Amino acid sequence: MNETAGTTRFGFAAIIGAPNAGKSTLVNQLVGAKISIVSHKVQTTRARIRAIMVKDNAQVVLVDTPGIFAPRRKLDEHMVKSAWAGSAEADATALLVDARRGLDDETEAIIKQLEANKAKALLIINKTDLMKRDLLLPLAQNLNERFPFTDTFMVSALNGSGVEKLRDKLASLMPEGPWHYPGDQSADVNLRFLAAEITREKIYERLHEELPYSSTVETEGWEEHKDGSVKISQAIFVERDGQKAIVLGKGGQTVKTIGQLARADMEKQFERRVHLFLFVKVRENWAQDPERLRHMGLLE
């Protein structure tokens, strides 16, 4: 069934949770395409990314929110504010909990805020493939005693187990209405932003502990060529000269590798040839700069 057959549904579903609970992996699994940056690092999703899931006659915009945590700096504050704004705007809210961590302090704080907001939410227990089955039911019972969740789902966002039932439920919660996007569109993000997210993911994968959260990427140039290829120029911003040296690597080898990995991913995503040019720039305290936060979608 598609948007032209029978009654259609359209709405928004917000996925909230503590950092590294698996929100981006779950969104990618629900949509069936790579939309959000996925990393073993926490707090990798900085802005709300709207992915588009289609299930039968329903089109669901999945709001992949930043992880909710105790903020320490301006960037953190806006990330948390962005996460709760995504939930407030949604027709359905789902709290994603890492089965291994259970009801920890961060999840407890999120539940308290849900209570304060008088919100309705369904519960998704993720990473169930990493837990013994006899431990999952007591965890679900404990969480449901803590908050009156409307439904509970056990899933593995990584391998897709249990995700189809969740997909059905989210679709059923959407109000009746026309679709807002073409049926084959999988994200409401512009390609410049998505290109920057791809490069940022490769930085995380490559540099691990050396450069935790001190970098961001901006697509400064996007030039379409007649042969269908695109020239993309991006700036990698860091806060100190020492961090610039880390990104560049000996003889520029590290940034070259990052560029090769990012370009390959972009070509797969955009289905076209990509000419990628990366420039590493120092901008002190970029994470406190309103202009940078606005560019990242964390400020209006």
Image: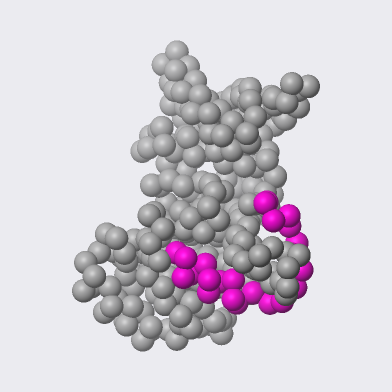
Q: Is residue 142 above or below residue 86?
A: below
Q: Magenta segment, which residues? A: 163-185
Q: Position of residue 134 (x, y in %)?
A: 21, 74
Q: Is residue 142 left or right of residue 26?
A: left
Question: Residue 124, position in %: x, y?
Answer: 43, 70
Compared with 89, 219 (above or below) is above
- Work out whether residue 6 or residue 115 is closer to the camera in this orientation and state it: 6
Name above or below for residue 248 compared with residue 79: above
Coloration of the structure image: one colour
Residue 91 located left or right of residue 258: right
Does 179 lie within the magenta span?
yes
Front one among 182 and 222: 182
Q: Quadrant of residue 55?
A: bottom right
Horizontal relation, residue 208 to residue 283: left or right: left
Q: Residue at x 45, y 13 (%)?
A: 251
Residue at the image position 63 percent from the left and 52 percent from the top: 186
Instruction: Name the quarter where the C terminus is drawn.
Output: bottom right
Relative to 217, is 116 above or below?
below
Residue 191: x and y in percent read 68, 40
Pick the quarter of the image with the N terminus: bottom right
Asked whether 11 or 222 is in front, the reply is 11
Measuring 68% from the left and 77% from the top, which residue is drawn there?
175
Residue 161 visible, this orientation: yes
Task: Assess whether residue 53 is covered by the magenta stretch.
Answer: no
Q: In the rendering, at what x and y percent does residue 31 appear?
A: 55, 56
- Name the residue located 76 percent from the left edge and 65 percent from the top edge: 4
Can residue 17 be seen here? The reply is: no
